[in-house]
Amino acid sequence: MLIYLAFLNQNNIMASIDNKGRIRGKAGSVIYRMYRGKNIMQGKPRKFEQTEGSIRASTEFGLSSSAAAAIRRAFEPAYIHRDGEAVSRTTQQVYRSLRNSLSGSIGQRDLHDANLQDLLGMDFNGASPLAEVLQISHSVVRNAEGNLEVSLGRFKPKEDVKKAAGYPDSASRYRIRLMVVALDFRQMYLEYLDIKDLDVHKTAVMEAQTITLNAKADPGCIVMLSMSLLMYDQVPHTCEYVLLNTKGFSPCAIIAAFPAEQAAPMAAKPFRLSKEAYPDRHEKIQEMGYDGNRLLREFKRKHPSESKKVTADAMAQPPELPKPGSRQSFKGILKQRG
């Protein structure tokens, strides 16, 4: 070892032995250091160049992660509390929906090209999946006017809410919340279109009914609908109701998703929100905070030839996207997957 170090020192590859006989510093591709009284030898970190395949994969996964984050932020008023694995789970579902796209290749597609059926049943709280907790029938249809008609089955809380870990036994009022959000990932904005709450006392029964929600969005927007279950208890002295949902129990999922009627071009400029231009919608519109377009521009700059190339990843035939007038039931989708 001493002869080896002497050779390295002669060639200006420095490593030294201190007065206690410990080796420190670099010796070729090896680094010597001390850790908790032990002489540690480790390999010198090396830089690895990414292959075209790894760059394509990282671009698409980064886009999926950013799109999933935008969806989570959009539906926060619906789910209130998400579990610790929601980030990974929602990103994987968005990534799967992109992989099942036929209308674009990697580096040339986003959620507007995706198979939105893969987003149905996206749970924001995996500790209390909506389909398992809220056991009532429901389906969604988009009518000719572009609005959503949600058909809900008879709801009796004592029978139709499954008690799972974290379930608040003190709940005296149940609220089914339906929320419609429009999302344009190319112009990077979202709009809250409608929200409706249906309240039921724990001993009461809500008969089957159909709820109509406004879903008239700009042509470039994807329209998504969530359903969530909120539980409340009444404070005896003030008669106020307190929300009981927690990180351990807060059921909410995407139950319908409809593609944009006419998505904006990939190179479209970001939406500019102003109170003067949108006086009636200003408070309902938000910037998305989406990074996917930057990733696609960066990929195109580095790989201009990819814009003309269709990869094998885009060759799998996805299920047909829903059209106006068609019904969606995410319970049926989950059964098909299972």
Image (tube, helix red, strand yellow):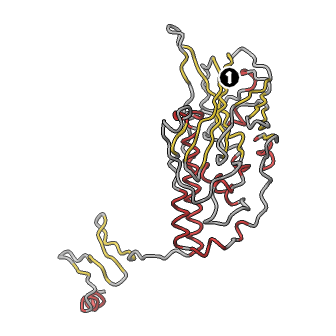
Q: Classify 10 Å Cα crowding around label 1: few (below 14), some (14-19), many (20 and above).
A: few
Q: Position of residue 50 (x, y in %)?
A: 52, 74
Q: Amino acid at mark 1?
A: Leu
Q: Position of residue 194 (x, y in %)?
A: 64, 31
Up-down relation of residue 190 to residue 56 (above or below):
above
Does residue 280 appear left or right of residue 14 in this picture? right
Task: Identify the residue at image location x=54%, y=37%.
Answer: 278
Up-down relation of residue 25 to residue 122 (above or below):
below
Task: Identify the residue at image location x=28%, y=66%.
Answer: 37
Answer with the quarter of the image where residue 164 lies: top right
Please identify the residue farthest to the top as the structure is shown. Answer: 237
Answer with the quarter of the image where residue 27 lies: bottom left
Quick one: quadrant of the N terminus? bottom left
The foreground one among 43 and 141 is 141
Does residue 57 appear left or right of residue 203 in this picture? left
Write down the residue under mark 1: 198
Secondary structure, mark 1, is: strand
Up-down relation of residue 220 to residue 24 (above or below):
above
